[in-house]
Amino acid sequence: MNIDGLEEKYLKQYNASLPLKQQISTMIKSFPLSGRAAKTFLDIGMPNPIMSKMLRKKGGSWSTIVRSPKLLEFTSKLLNDSNVSCLGINGELPYSDKSFDYIIVALDILPAMPDQESFLKECHRVLKLNGRLIIAIQNKRPLSIITHKRNKLAEKINGFTPINSAMLQKDVFQFFNTGFNVISCEYYSKFFTELARIKEYEASITGNPQNKKVPSYWLANQLDFFIFGGKGYVTVITAERRQWRERVSPVLSDGRSIQEAVLSQRL
């Protein structure tokens, strides 16, 4: 493995991607300003190993979970650390209960989970009492052009895309309510940056030469400067751990769930 060549490749990729740089800077804002050296951190699923390296430079004791086995060896060598593991197929985390003060989850990890509730519960398990979960989630605005673009891309490739997985703010609070208190929401990736990110993602998965030319992130950033007061299309949630409460699905008087009742009517 040519680690120098791979590091140069990932560093170049990171430097060319405004969304990746915005994701890291927004997540770092959610860390404690002091006392980091005494804290334990876990970062999960960073799309570029350079991001894990940058997080570790901020102090504290770190462990890293990579997205796939092919990143495992390189990331461990890049970080010069054996505390690197691979995310389980169903989102399992190979750590004992209450191991970390902070867990940082990269964008697109939550929607990739077969069972998002189970993954959230797994994060809750390995967090210490009053530990904090910092997680990037796409912000959904039903009437936005960005939402339309995300949906059209999903239709174009006839399937699920992480780009199309977004949550309304009210749903964010409801989703985390089983075991966390949401204490802050920070936003990044404004309109033109998000538009460029969608085009970049489309180019990466379609292989169509016409899609290879991605709008400049530099230009997108300049245009976004003139959007005063607008929230970004990606949210970094900070949620504090509390006692877990299983989500209870509403049932009818005869004991059936609403879903069961609807299915029976259709049959």
Image: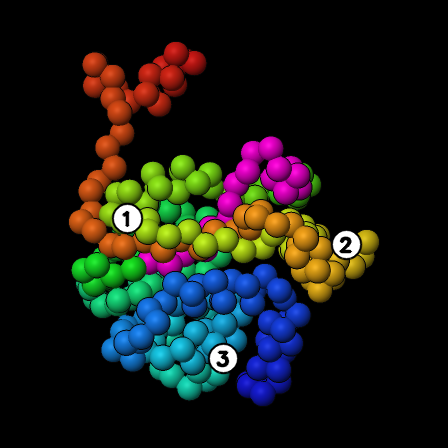
Q: Residue at point 81% right, 54% down?
A: 210
Q: In this view of the protein, can residue 34 be seen by the observer?
A: yes
> What amino acid type is highlighted by mark number 3?
Phe
> What amino acid type is highlighted by mark number 1?
Asn
Q: In this view, does 85 lie to the left or right of 140?
A: left
- Residue 106, compared with residue 143, is above or below; it is below
Q: What element carries label 3?
A: helix
Q: Indicate whether residue 144 is drawn in magenta.
A: yes
Q: Indicate whether residue 32 is drawn in magenta.
A: no
The quadrant in which residue 79 appears is: bottom left
Sequence order check, earlier mark of 3 and 1: 3
Dot 2 corresponds to which residue? Answer: 211
Bounds of the magenta span?
133-149
Point out which mark residue 98 bears. Answer: none
Q: In this view, does 103 lie to the left or right of 54?
A: left
Q: Residue at point 22% right, 40% down?
A: 246
- Residue 100, compared with residue 74, is above or below; it is above
Q: Is mark 1 on a helix, strand or loop?
A: strand
Q: In front here: 247 or 128?
A: 128
Specify the quadrant that holds the C terminus: top left
Front: mark 2 or 3: 2
Position of residue 153 measured from the top left corner of the image (x, y, whole percent): 66, 43
Point out which mark residue 181 bears. Answer: 1
Sequence order check, earlier mark of 2 and 3: 3
> What amino acid type is highlighted by mark number 2?
Asn
Point out which mark residue 74 bears. Answer: 3
Q: Residue at point 46% right, 78% down?
A: 53
Q: Residue at point 45% right, 54% down?
A: 186
Packing grade of label 1 (10 A; few <14, some 14-19, many >=20) is some
